[in-house]
Amino acid sequence: MIAIFAGGSAAIGEPLSLHERIDGIISTANLEANQPVAGLADDAEFFRRVNLDLSGVVPTAKAVQAFLSDNDPGKRTKIIDRLLSDSDNYSRRMREEFHVQLMERRGDDKTWETWLEKSFAENKPWDQMTREIIRADFRDEPNRGAAFFYTKRLQKTGAQPTDHSGVTRDVGRLFLGIDLQCAECHNHRLIDDYDQVDFQGLFAGFSKLKLLNEPYPAVEEQLLSAKQEYASVFTGVPREVAPKVPGFDEIELAVFTKGEEYIQPPDRKTKTPGIPKFSPLAGFAKLIPESPNFSKNITNRLWYLMMGRGLVEPLDQFHSENPPSHPELLDIMAQELTAHQYDIKWLIRELALTQTYQRSSKLPEGVTSAPPERFSVAVQRRLSAEQLLWSTIRATGHTPEDVPLENIKAEQKDAEDFIGLRSRFASAFANEPKEPEREFSPSVKGALFMMNDPEVLKLVESMSDREVTVENLYLQIFSSYPDAAELAEGTQYLDKAANRKAALRDLAWAMLTSTEFVVNH
């Protein structure tokens, strides 16, 4: 016998899966608010969405046809599992996404990106990845790329001092979901939960970081033998704090006699940094993943990644006056993620299996608006610069099925041309450096890029026109079949054209630059 619940079904006596519990909570909240919910997306909409979210690229026309013609009722689960098991494209997608989330377009580093991609290919637990980033041990050769998180932020710009404050703020924002910037010089004036000691405690541990001149990302921890002194600009009362993670006690400073401070003393001849016996980074690497905010922060960011909006918005504003839209749901998911050893792929799979994720982006009949925080309708969002790059290449027919995308050079003469195209897509469509990439708006820069970039035009111009029809174009570019009106309009346009090849290119270009293509709907 099967018991039916709001979010799915389970055999009587069997516990609900996480995706069923998620749907139950979302459905109940919408029911109580008298908010109609959209039905499930049709197969074409779902297939395009899940490919973009899990592999970062639109599917091939061949894959679309196969999925739409498949009558297996379990085909959605099967495609989710297949995309997650595609190590090449899944790990590339996650590397690109977390590179942008963590570095916010500050720059690129091959060692860092290789570390990210390898970590996701191995499905390394998120708490372990975080410890490797926070600890930043350049002697740990397989994981030394993780130090790029620090090194790029510690690079000096002009006469400005090394930005230890920026590192402090970003660790809080990106790993704990708390933006302590306005608590550096005094208790936060608007958020009671954020105190100056929270900022200064983290700052105490990062203030001694020094950038090393190595061919790979590397930082040195210099000796810390005294607490961080600080005072509020409003009171002037002097205070001090040892390295401290918000929500935890101070890490007790270890005091050593002169000459005994190092496990391994620095070597001036070889210019090798020493290894201090007291390491604030080691303490932070242990405590940050133990914070309740840690699991909630990554859970919220993964929910945002899949659903287009966080349960807590903005993502780095966790505090008592800004509760989650669904507090119980965030608690349950964070607890489950912790119980599953911070298995990111597991949580993404559960989210993809939900009806909440698979809803249509079309409003229910008779409904004129749907508050995005209710998740009653799929939240539409603009593709990232990376998704647009790969999807443009694939939609113009330049990548065969089941080939790792970065092995394809988009018919460029060499890899440098391809890398140049990637950087130009980022320049045209990404946000400015240091700006969280949360929302994208159409821009003249992006439009001009698609109109005039020679490599983009080359991709369109070199499309094969052998037996190309309007139906082929829709499958290849929009991942769906055209409706009757679209088919008639497109066919009529091509039939009337004096130069069919030129008309085909114009039609393809118009489709590639349309809202239909650039939005993950």
Image (cartoon, rainbow, N blue to C red):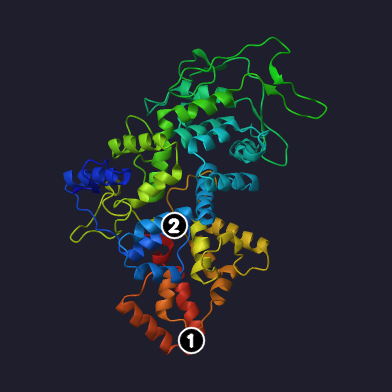
Q: Do the residues labelled 2 and 1 touch (CB within 8 Å)?
A: no
Q: Distance between the residues labelled 2 and 1?
A: 38 Å
Name the quadrant containing residue 427.
bottom right
Tell me: residue 393, above or below residue 165. below
The residue identified by callout 1 is 500
For residue 316, say whether it is visible. no
Tell me: residue 232, above or below residue 56. above
Kind of residue at badge 2: Arg
Q: In this view, does 484 lie to the left or right of 162?
A: left
Q: Which residue is drawn at 56% across and 16% down?
A: 229
The mark nearer the N terminus, 2 or 1, is: 2
**In front here: 485 or 127?**
127
Tell me: residue 366, above or below residue 266. below
Rendering coords of residue 441 (x, y %)? 43, 56
Q: Which residue is drawn at 18% across and 47% down?
A: 31
Badge 1, how many Cα within 10 Å: few under 14, some, many 20+?
A: some
Kind of residue at badge 1: Arg
The residue identified by callout 2 is 82
Q: Is residue 486 left or right of residue 57?
A: left
Secondary structure under the numbered disc 1 in the rendered image: helix
Badge 2, how many Cα within 10 Å: few under 14, some, many 20+?
A: few
Residue 44's disc number: none
